Image (spheres, helix red, strand yellow):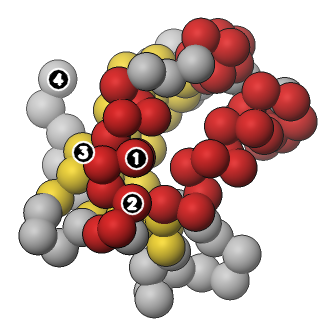
């Protein structure tokens, strides 16, 4: 968290493979409870994923309320249920051409926020 005790907000984008659209939506309609708990343990709150069609762009936004983002993301990524979840969702996605090397979901810079 910031020194003022406020969360850090994130925005990220990735492509959704058109042929995987229905599967991806269904998976998220029934997100596994252990995955939801891992997200919460990692300090992530107010997590949303939006789909822009027909471009097939996914936009995710969330707030991070923890103290060690890198450590919390590492711990979440090591969770066996999260790894199984990602094995199901990753084939549905394709990184943006503009993503940095090794970046799956491309980060987006916040340019406006009004609480």
The tag earlier along the polypeptide, 1 or 4, is 1
Please determine whether, in this image, residue 34 is positioned above or below residue 56: above
Instruction: Kindly report which numbered mark, 1 or 4, lies closer to the viewer in this rendering.
Output: 1
The tag earlier along the polypeptide, 2 or 3, is 2
Q: Pick whichever, 113 or 45, lies toward us.
A: 45
The disc at residue 20 is 2
| Discs 1, 2 touching: Cβ within 8 Å | yes
Label 1 sits on residue:
24
Is residue 108 shown to the viewer in this render?
no
The disc at residue 50 is 3
| Position of the C terminus by quadrant | top left
| Discs 3, 1 touching: Cβ within 8 Å | no
In the image, what residue occupies the spot 30% across and 49% down? 22
Is residue 85 shown to the viewer in this render?
yes
Question: How far separated are the C-alphas under marks 4 and 3?
Answer: 20 Å
| Position of the N terminus by quadrant | top right
The tag earlier along the polypeptide, 3 or 1, is 1
Q: Position of residue 46 (x, y in %)?
A: 37, 21
Disc 2 crowd, CA 10 A, few/some/many (<14, 14-19, 20+): few
Label 4 sits on residue:
115
Relative side of 47 to 41, left or right: left
Question: How far separated are the C-alphas under marks 3 and 1?
Answer: 12 Å
In the image, what residue occupies the spot 24% across and 67% down? 56
Please determine whether, in this image, residue 27 is positioned above or below residue 40: below
The tag earlier along the polypeptide, 4 or 2, is 2
Q: Position of residue 88 (x, y in %)?
A: 62, 47
Residue 29, located in which quarter of the rendered image?
Answer: top left
């Amino acid at each position: 968290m910031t020194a003022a005790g406020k969360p850090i907000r994130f925005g990220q984008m990735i492509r959704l493979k058109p042929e995987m659209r229905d599967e991806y939506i269904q998976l998220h309609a029934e997100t596994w409870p252990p995955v939801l708990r891992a997200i919460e343990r990692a300090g992530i709150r107010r997590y949303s994923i939006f789909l822009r069609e027909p471009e097939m762009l996914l936009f995710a936004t969330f707030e991070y309320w923890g103290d060690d983002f890198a450590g919390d993301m590492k711990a979440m990524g090591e969770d066996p249920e999260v790894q199984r979840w990602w094995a199901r969702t990753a084939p549905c996605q394709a990184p943006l051409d503009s993503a940095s090397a090794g970046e799956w979901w491309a980060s987006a810079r916040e340019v406006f926020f009004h609480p």
